[in-house]
Image (cartoon, rainbow, N blue to C red):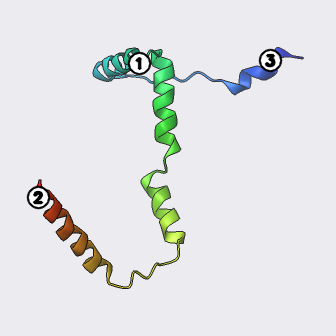
Amino acid sequence: MNISCYYHAVSAFQIREFPNDLKRKLARRARTNNLTMSDYALAVLREALGRPDPMELRDRLRKLAPVDLGIPAADLLEECRHESRLVSARR
């Protein structure tokens, strides 16, 4: 089998003008997690890109059918805020 067919699966990635403060933070977090900086950066990117961005989330929500809560949403939110304030006051 020709080994050159495997080279398309992995590519190099370079960030130009990478700020020193971010590099230090990346290095520190990578060490804390016993990873190389490349492996840690890849894990962070996978996690971030695995979540929908705000525009994707908005589009997904627009496709959902409306839900009848039985009461106006503003009243429900006010009720939740009131309950939250009561819980906070007890602490």
**Location of residue 23 in the rendering, given as x and y in whole percent from the top left corner:** 35, 19
For the point 52% across and 76% down, the residue is 65
> Can you tell which of label 3 and label 2 is closer to the viewer?
2
Specify which label sits upstream in the sequence, 3 or 1: 3
> Can you tell which of label 3 and label 1 is closer to the viewer?
1
Which secondary structure, mark 3? Answer: helix
Please name the amino acid that badge 3 sits on.
Answer: Ser
- Numbered label tally: 3
Q: Which residue is mark 2?
A: 90
Please name the amino acid that badge 1 sits on.
Answer: Ala
Q: Is residue 75 above or below residue 55?
A: below
Which secondary structure, mark 1? Answer: helix
Viewer-side residue, 15 vs 24: 24
> Can you tell which of label 1 and label 2 is closer to the viewer?
2
For the point 58% across and 21% down, the residue is 12
Q: Which residue is mark 1?
A: 30
**Location of residue 55 in the rendering, given as x and y in whole percent from the top left corner:** 45, 57
Q: Quadrant of residue 77?
A: bottom left
Which secondary structure, mark 2? Answer: helix
For the point 9% across and 59% down, the residue is 89
**Location of residue 76 in the rendering, given as x and y in whole percent from the top left corner:** 29, 76
For the point 52% across and 43% down, the residue is 50
Outermost residue, right direction? Answer: 1
Q: Is residue 74 above or below residue 43?
A: below
Numbered tag placed on residue 4 in the rendering: 3
